[in-house]
């Protein structure tokens, strides 16, 4: 009996890995989400923690095996179609040794919620997630918002409106393509404030309506029409 009690006590006293953390970085395109993610991952690495970076294999705009910011900063990564394969691809021992996992373009991972739960709650990892919270229609994009209730911190970044310079909260698509997932850069998307998002959608809807008419040529692009509505601030005269 004593031996059995000692064995049970020993099992209870075995230390468990500390619980992890989840940090979410969201915002429109060109808001600096990837830059903020790389800054956090680099800081953790410089502090002595083992880090790993993951991005969606759908995003190959700048590099296949690196996370790259719009201004050219790079960090090597695993390009995956789903997060559930990360443990197997890396190997169990290597996975166990990792302290911090960064996930870029998180909106493309359908299994984001389950992966974050497992990595932080069971495996004690610090998980830093960066992604779009909304698509070009200002509707939820993927599973990023599902992770918010799990998060220790949520950072909402803003960009600068390309048309007036004010804070930009939304991503405007400059083409008539309507599918949600369209991986592209400044040639297709631009960050805009609320005013120019609304006026831009009116222009796009009008352009689509005109394009449906027979033998009609649209003279100017939606972007050029938008640019004609730029706000020009004039300094008040000194009295």
Image: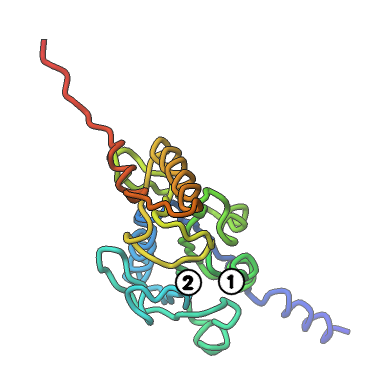
Quadrant location of the C terminus?
A: top left
Which is nearer the eye, 109 or 88?
109
Q: Do the residues labelled 2 and 1 touch (CB within 8 Å)?
A: yes
Percent position of residue 62, x then y: 32, 74
Q: Marks 2 and 1, how far apart in space? A: 9 Å
Q: Is residue 224 above or below residue 70?
A: above
Percent position of residue 182, x then y: 47, 66
Dot 2 surroundings within 10 Å: few (below 14), some, or many (20 or more)? many
Q: Is residue 217 left or right of residue 10?
A: left
Q: Residue at x 10, y 14 (%)?
A: 238
Q: Which residue lies furthest to the left in this view?
A: 238
Q: Is mark 2 on a helix, strand or loop?
A: strand
Q: What element carries label 1?
A: helix
Dot 1 surroundings within 10 Å: few (below 14), some, or many (20 or more)? many
Q: Is residue 71 left or right of residue 76?
A: left
Q: Is residue 10 left or right of residue 161?
A: right
Q: Which residue is drawn at 28% across and 39% down?
A: 228
Quadrant location of the N terminus?
A: bottom right
**According to the image, label 2 marks what residue?**
101
The answer to which of marks 2 and 1 sits earlier in the sequence is 2
**According to the image, label 1 marks what residue?**
119
């Amino acid at each position: 009996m004593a031996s059995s009690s000692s064995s049970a006590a020993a099992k209870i006293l075995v230390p468990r890995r500390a619980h992890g953390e989840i940090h979410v970085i969201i915002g429109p395109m060109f808001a600096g989400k990837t830059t903020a993610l790389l800054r956090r991952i680099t800081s953790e690495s410089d502090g002595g923690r083992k880090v790993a970076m993951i991005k969606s294999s759908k995003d190959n705009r700048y590099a296949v095996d690196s996370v790259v910011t719009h201004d050219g900063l790079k960090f090597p990564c695993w390009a995956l179609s789903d997060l559930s394969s990360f443990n197997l691809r890396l190997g169990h021992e290597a996975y166990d040794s990792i302290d911090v996992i960064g996930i870029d373009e998180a909106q493309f991972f359908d299994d984001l919620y389950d992966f974050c739960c497992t990595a932080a709650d069971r495996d004690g990892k610090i998980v830093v997630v960066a992604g779009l919270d909304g698509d070009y229609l200002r509707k939820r994009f993927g599973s990023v918002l599902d992770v918010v209730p799990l998060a220790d911190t949520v950072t909402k970044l803003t960009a600068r409106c390309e048309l007036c310079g004010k804070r930009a909260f939304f991503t405007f698509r400059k083409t008539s393509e309507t599918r949600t997932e369209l991986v592209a850069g400044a040639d297709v998307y631009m960050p805009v404030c609320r005013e120019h998002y609304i006026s831009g959608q009116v222009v796009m809807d009008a352009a689509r309506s005109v394009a449906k008419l027979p033998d009609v040529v649209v003279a100017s692009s939606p972007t050029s029409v938008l640019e004609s509505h730029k706000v020009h601030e004039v300094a008040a005269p000194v009295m």
